[in-house]
Amino acid sequence: MKKNVSFLLLTFLVLTFLSSCSKDSTSTSNTATTTTTTTISNTQVIFTVKDLEGNLKSGYTIMMFTEEVDLNEVLPTIEMQVLSNSEGIAKFDLNDYIVNPTTLYFEAFIKDGNNYIFKSITHPVLEFKKGSQITTGIYAE
């Protein structure tokens, strides 16, 4: 009988100890769970690529530069490039690129093997700041 009482007492103490160590599910820390949401408009430019007759141009590579392109010189560094889709749309997501106000230059090309052929008729020069959303066109041959 003494063994049974000792066993029951030991079991009761273990269960009491385990239940007192359970995790508190209602306790939260504000510093650990605080989420800051800042709403910033996407910084982007959307081009419609078309010829002078208004026909949409798909498969054109629109390149972005930080300086003007001179066809008599080597191309400046290509900062970003986007291929126009079947609807002639080329969308640049600049959210991570634009930090300070800046001027960007855009030109249209088509790819021929490993080379690009210059096709721009117009040469957009656009001013950007964080949050700018620009929709415009670029004319190409």
Image: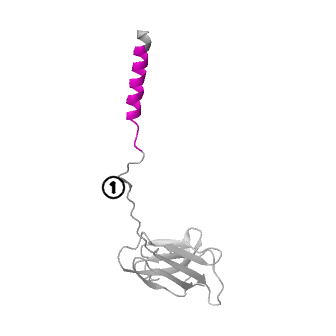
- Amino acid type at circle 1 is Thr
Q: Quadrant of the N terminus?
A: top left
Q: Quadrant of the C terminus?
A: bottom right
**Frontmost residue, 29 versus 106:** 29
Q: Position of residue 19 (x, y in %)?
A: 41, 33
Position of 9 relative to 55 (above/below): above
Which image quadrant is residue 96 in?
A: bottom left
Q: Position of residue 74 (x, y in %)?
A: 43, 77
Question: Is disc 1 placed on a helix, strand or loop?
Answer: helix
Looking at the image, residue 117 sits to the left or right of residue 5; the answer is right
**Frontmost residue, 30 versus 3:** 3
**Furthest residue toward left:** 31
The magenta segment: 5-24
**Frontmost residue, 12 versus 137:** 12
Please check the rendered image and state whether residue 11 is part of the magenta-colored stretch, yes or no. yes
Q: Residue at x 55, y 77 (%)?
A: 109
Q: Position of residue 6 (x, y in %)?
A: 40, 15
Q: Main secondary structure of the magenta part?
A: helix
Q: Residue at x 41, y 66 (%)?
A: 37
Q: Residue at x 41, y 71 (%)?
A: 97
Which image quadrant is residue 118 in?
A: bottom right
Q: How many marks?
A: 1
Please check the rendered image and state whether residue 67 is part of the magenta-colored stretch, yes or no. no
Which image quadrant is residue 116 in?
A: bottom right
Q: Residue at x 49, y 82 (%)?
A: 134
Q: Which residue is mark 1?
A: 31
